[in-house]
Amino acid sequence: MAQVSLRKVVKYYDDVEAVSAIDLDIADKEFVVLVGPSGCGKSTTLRMIAGLEEITDGEIAVDGEVVNDVPPKDRDMAMVFQNYALYPHMTVYQNMSFGLRLKHYPKDEIEKRVQEAARILDIKELLDRKPRQLSGGQRQRVAMGRAIVRNPKVFLFDEPLSNLDAKLRVQMRTEIKRVHQKVRTTTVYVTHDQVEAMTLADRVVVMNKGKIEQIGAPNFLYHSPATRFVAGFIGSPSMNFIPCKLEQAGEGLNVRLSDTIAFAVPAERVQRYRSAAGRELTFGVRPEHVTEAKVNGAKNLATFDAGVEVVEPMGNETMVFFSIGATEVCARTDPNAGAKVGSNLKMAAHLDHMHLIDNATGQVL
Amino acid sequence: MSTVSATAGSIPATRPKYGSMSRDRRWALRWSYFFLVLFAIFFLTPPIYMFITSLKTSAEISAATNPWWVYNPTLGNYAELLTSPSYLTYFRNSAIVSIFTVTITMLISVPAAFALSRMRFWGSATLATGVFLTYLIPETLLFLPLFKMFAVFNEWTGIELINRWWVLLLLYPTLTVPFCTWIMIGYFASIPKELDEAALMDGANYRQILTRVFIPVALPGLIAATIFAFTVSWAQFLYPLAFTTSADQLVLPVGIITSLIKGDVFNWGQIMTGALLGAAPPLIIYAFLMDYYIAGLTAGATKG
């Protein structure tokens, strides 16, 4: 049980800044996911928390105690690696008990803990096998077991599911969530997969170019991204970004996407966008908020005609692609909406879910 | 339906010639066997000749008979050597020197390789290359300066290093340590970095990482290095020839030459017997460790 905080943590590799002055507070028992594209500094951050990388500047504290100079073995954290990193010459039992044996735990205590972890992870029948006799998913379970038996203050996961095939990844994702609900240990989890981040996290930390873009609960990030990067990174298929101009229209504001398409900004948002009137901005809207214009009951819909270019039926829904100006737009429509390539479809944008992004700063207004 | 039959009908009647896989394989095998037999003959002829000669009396060796056949086989050479105190002394010296050399080599080169390959410190890469470069300097260039060093050391301290069998324990590691370190660096480098990090997180210190993770995982490499060190020290000729002189200090290769060649009289039967018996220990070690050795040579080629 531990609370971890990072204060202005900086990491330089030679002259390259990998992590620049990040602040992060992780509460006790919280599941925090660091997510971002490769090279964004998320793994480096995790490794600094683990003590595997020295920090160039700033401080990392566990339960209020600064651990900058504490070696990994004394930080009482357990880590699960992408390639599992099981000891190939040891059996599953030996792998899981290695940490406890190093600390000279009594034999029956080790036995109890390993059996308990094996029960949680459903790997009891594998305890006598060597890692090479296990499948990828089983290896990952053992790696998690090795972390669980130590009953550490913090779990660290470094892209643990990246080496698994798609189906297993989904299974193991659920498994990790289940394990966390059982053992309730503070967890820091690194991934480049935003779906993993969304599904697992209590809070998601989106990182880009060594900086934290935004921290928040998964749904909050999804609906209220702070920056264009977060808006585009979270959600699949990703948000549509269309260049637009914000025009004054009497008391209200108009978003002009093209010569023919312009929407009135919903009245409750006018105040928020007022200061940006007259500027070139980016209009962001998620595919599910661009639908065929048949939805009843929703307010603040802006309808327009779209020339359908590509249709991708998914069964439960149909993705429709069309262009506004030079920008391709993806829309999620009902499979019965009747989208046909080459035909015109009446579309509706749900303006309650629109975002306007400052082109210069990348901030969502 | 119609498309299926149309496709079937469009296959040309005569298929292009691609050559036959099994015929290629047969030819490859023939060539392999040809060269294997050639090599076997080339390398086995000397020991067979030694064996034949070792079964002959001195009279038969010097007689103008067929050298490839034994007319009056005798075990006299073996009996004489195995009861000769000096031969047994050489054998014992060789065994002691080799075993200690292997031990010393491993005690130095395994930790050195671990430090050089894993404990990233300033200059470790340069140092690793440097270790290997020292191996490239032949001992024929080194024995004179070494001799001089020992003489000077004797002048300063009064400790005599020349003509002591144990001084070989100082000399042989100069040959074995660099190469074994180099082999072990290669092995340790093939162990994924996450493995030592996992051990670090599990609470191991560097010594425990080395003894409980690295050495067991790199065991094939360790055995390859052991065999190398043993072979080098068992077969070493120049250093013992230069640094040891009295009969009780000699090791096997030098002992055979000095005691069995008297002036211009070559006791060929016993020389051959001595050499054959001397070749036995490495042979036995190879036979036992061969599987490991091969596994060691090819380890890391594919992901486990």
Image (spheres, coloured by chain):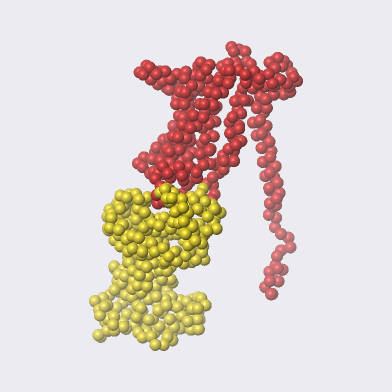
Chain colours: A yellow, B red
Q: Is residue B105 left or right of residue B272?
A: left
The C terminus of chain A lies in quadrant: bottom left
The residue shown at (35%, 84%) is: A300
Q: Is residue A105 above or below residue B9?
A: above
Q: Is residue A294 left or right of residue A246?
A: right
The N terminus of chain A lies in quadrant: bottom left
Is residue B177 visible in this depiction of the protein? yes
Q: Is residue A360 left or right of residue A84?
A: left
- Locate residue A351, reporting x and y percent: 35, 81
Count of numbered marks = 0
Q: Residue furthest bottom?
A: A296
Nearest the eye: B18 or A233? A233
The residue shown at (31%, 72%) is: A364
Q: Is residue A215 above or below residue A88?
A: below
- Locate residue B126, reporting x and y percent: 39, 39
Q: Is residue B251 left or right of residue A254?
A: right
Nearest the eye: A123 or A256? A123
Nearest the eye: B280 or A343? B280
Q: Residue furthest top?
A: B263
The residue shown at (74%, 23%) is: B69
The residue shown at (68%, 54%) is: B18
Residue A189, by quadrant, is bottom left
Is residue A209 visible in this depiction of the protein? no
- Locate residue B252, reporting x and y percent: 56, 22
- Locate residue A192, reporting x and y percent: 41, 62
Q: Is residue A98 above or below residue B5?
A: above
